[in-house]
Image: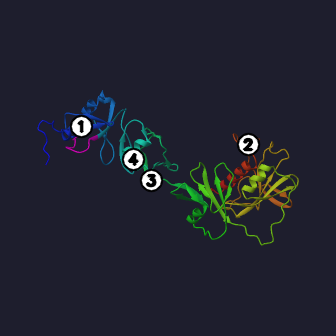
Amino acid sequence: MTQHDSNEPPDHTAERAQTAVRVNDEVVELNDQTPTGKQILAAARLLPAADYALIRWPERGSTNEVALDEVINLPPSGSLTEFFAMKADGIRYFTLEDERYAWAGPLDVETVRRIGRVDEKMSLWLELTDEEDRMLVPGEVIDLKAPGVERLYAKMPSWRLQIQHKDYEFDSPQIIVRDALIRAGFDVTKSWEVKFKVKNQAIRPVGMDDVLDLSQPGVERLRVAPANVDNGDGAQDARRDFSLLPADVAFLASAGLRCQTIIDGGRWLIVEGYALPAGYNAPRCTIAIEIPESYPTAQLDMFFCNPHLTANGAAPPQTQHRQVIAGIEFQRWSRHRGTGSEWTPGVDSLESHFALIEHAIAREVGA
């Protein structure tokens, strides 16, 4: 056994651990194993003590308030007892995973992660009563002055996608269309027409092997319908009474929309086989849009549907008027741009008008 030199200074580590604490990550020496909250603040040179809130952070469990005259029994050995001290006019509380935590002053997401010992792989969420719970982002400050106790919880991060009007959560932001359909219970051995919707963008077709990025802002849903099956005779030649702008032709092609142009008391774009969400009296409809001679300087306004649509068994408002186009009666949907979303030449186009159509149709059935 190795003997220590009798002249070597004694090791006071154990004694120091008994009479020291850590305040705001700094070691504070005390001369007492049973200090009061006021003594701890004074030793940390945080005076006047009455201006400070002292929060104990135990090795396990939640933080708790320490009153100025409260006696703290320091452990005889082991890790130093941890405290936070900050100038504050009072203590406030929040819950994390149903444990009640005391805090004073600003509370940011990183602090919650630290004192709650939340794994970095987990996301932090704020529980809300009148709206959907919200995921907290790095650097966000939680307002503990708001009425009521803030309720927080942690969970593995997930990304949401609505498929055929039902929400599904995925543990990765990148999802293959085929896998998404399997998750939703579709038989992927059959042929499906799948369209992807992102907020403020026109709906676009996607293939089974396409990868969807669910992390991009505004991701909304996948719409799925049986793919068209023809009888082998080939499609009829589309009618072309007037030409569309190249940008509009490109949009219609990219969206997989079949169309023709007809002059019949006006210039009409007829889009066939437009897929409808659940809740309508038909799985698809034909949409007509009047294209003014001076478009795109002049705006596109309203749209027309055949057959006449009902949403959840009722006719949508402002659809009573009928318009005959090439001998077919269409239902007019009087939907107009509101204040702040006026038509802007050079910015708006057939694509942006279809985004409005998509929104108007989906809204009537809550999609």
**Mark earlier in primary sequence (1, 4):** 1
Q: Is residue 319 visible?
A: no
Which of the 4 image quadrants contains residue 107?
top left
Q: Amino acid at mark 1?
A: Ala
Under tag 2, what secondary structure? Answer: loop
The CA span between labels 2 and 4 is 48 Å
Magenta segment: 72-81
- Looking at the image, is mark 3 or mark 1 nearer the viewer? 1
Q: Main secondary structure of the magenta part?
A: loop
Considering every residue shown, the one lying at the far top of the view is 48
Of the numbered discs 2 and 3, the one sitting upstream in the chain is 3
Q: Which mark is residue 347?
A: 2
> Does 234 sit above or below residue 358?
below
Q: Is residue 337 left or right of residue 179?
A: right
Depth check, front residue: 330 or 61: 61
Disc 1 element: strand
* For residue 40, side relative to residue 319 (left or right): left
The residue labelled by disc 1 is: 20
Kindly identify which residue carries mark 3: 155
